[in-house]
Image (spheres, coloured by chain):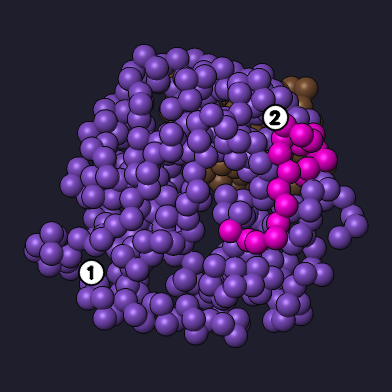
Chain colours: A brown, B purple
Amino acid sequence: MSLDLESCPHFAPGCRMNEKTQQPRTLLMPERALRLNGPSLEIVERCDGKHTVQQIITELQQLYSKAEPAKVEQDILGYLALLQRERALDFEPPAM
Amino acid sequence: MNETPTNPLALIAELTHRCPLHCVYCSNPLELTQRSSELSTEDWSRVFKEASALGVLQADFTGGEPLTRPDILDLIRAARAAGLYVNLITSGLPLDESRLEAIVQAGLDHFQLSFQGAHEEIAQEISGTKAHSQKLRVLEWLKRHRVAVTLNFVIHRRNIDQLGEMLSLAESSSATRVEFANVQYYGWAFANRDSLLPTREQLTQSIDFLKKARERLAGKIKVEYVVPDYYAKYPKPCMGGWARKLMLITPSGDALPCHAAKVIPGLCFENVKNRALREIWQDSEAFQKFRGESWMQEPCKTCDRRELDFGGCRCQAFLLTGDAAATDPVCSLSPQRPKVDAILNALKSVGAGFTQPAEPRLTKPDWLYRPNPA
């Protein structure tokens, strides 16, 4: 199942981050918690229903300018697909 | 074991043993806690704060039936205020739509609704209550509220042939997760085991069916299937290991490493009314008992898998072998595996089969129903 690069990921109902004051930052969902570090935190923070998948990729490629852009893209798409399979993310289709 | 254990990730808050259902597979202990012994709202609020300070991320509100607590809204608010993610494990009774709305407003993150089958007849047989139509109403209300929804279908010989209908029910709901959880044998389920265990043939067919369903629904609904331990080749890493990841607080405040731990004789359990949660987690005799590897017997002691499954389930080892330190006998490497095989082989002579005879009355077992404590 491939992701639409123009769609906007956002948290599904019941999926949220722990409080800003709680460390480490963690993505919480039914019966599961994902620890967020560097790149995964940067990705998840942009799953706000306003960033398209493509924008997330572009911004992270700029942020991690020393990394291979193709690898950054692959990692992001893989991570978003994982979160979608876990039903932590929904993807808003592109506005017409 | 001398090293400080890692922090627990989840707190199982067994809020009450009271329940309007009488399910024959209930994992509560046979000795149920009376209402008068239940922890107060204030007790639980303090437990949630201490759990959060200890690093716990999630609270599972369970029971019995957690909705029988009149202070359920206060409890949800207290857990959220303490910084916990709140799961509610419920039968959906007693509930109306305005109470559901209040529960969601109070901060509930995840609503897990149990189902005993795909229709009223099997639900009534298994739960001893007419609860199915209420659950269908709850499903409709859930569509109108923003909360994660999981449907949990408890599977056993009497309903494993209804997976298709159960899946259709799930697909017509707003659930994004559905668990088909085979009964595991503790508590009341252990007492009713011979009527609950599916045959190997039933199990194989169910695995094939749900594998296809999982693929079809990937990205839309997460389908999980848990097979009965007795049919596994290796044991489950029970609770993520004894006192490693999870702790359970009983309705009266006893701290346990799991819901069944009281079957193990000679363990001393501490109570949250008498001691801080952190100290109980780190130091209590019951929690220390099976941490590390020094308690292990062969083959676990030198087994390559011991860091994967920790030798399986201590409670199950006790229930089946009389020794809580033995290798969980569901393990194919256990010298006591033949005990489990004998139980499974005995099912053939019970006349269990995937296609039930047309007259369910003739095959309805003599169930031991779980009562509602005072």
Please say whether residue B278 is one of the residues in the magenta stretch. Answer: yes
- Quarter location, residue B45: top right
Q: Is residue B359 left or right of residue A66?
A: left
Residue labelled with disc 1: B354
Region of the chain picked out in magenta, as a range:
B263-281
Please name the residue shown 28% across and 80% down the image: B348
Please name the residue shown 49% across and 15% down the image: B105
Q: Nearer the viewer, residue B267 or A39?
A: B267
Please name the residue shown 69% across and 81% down the image: B299
Provide the secondary structure element on which disc 1 rests.
loop
Point out the residue furthest to the right here: B2
Say what amino acid the circle numbered 2 marks: Val
**What whole-number distance in Å separates the C-alpha atoms at marks 1 and 2?**
46 Å
Sequence-wise, the earlier of marks 1 and 2 is: 2
Residue B47: numbered disc: 2
Q: Residues within 10 Å of mark 2 (few under 14, many from 20)?
A: many
Please say whether residue B176 is one of the residues in the magenta stretch. Answer: no
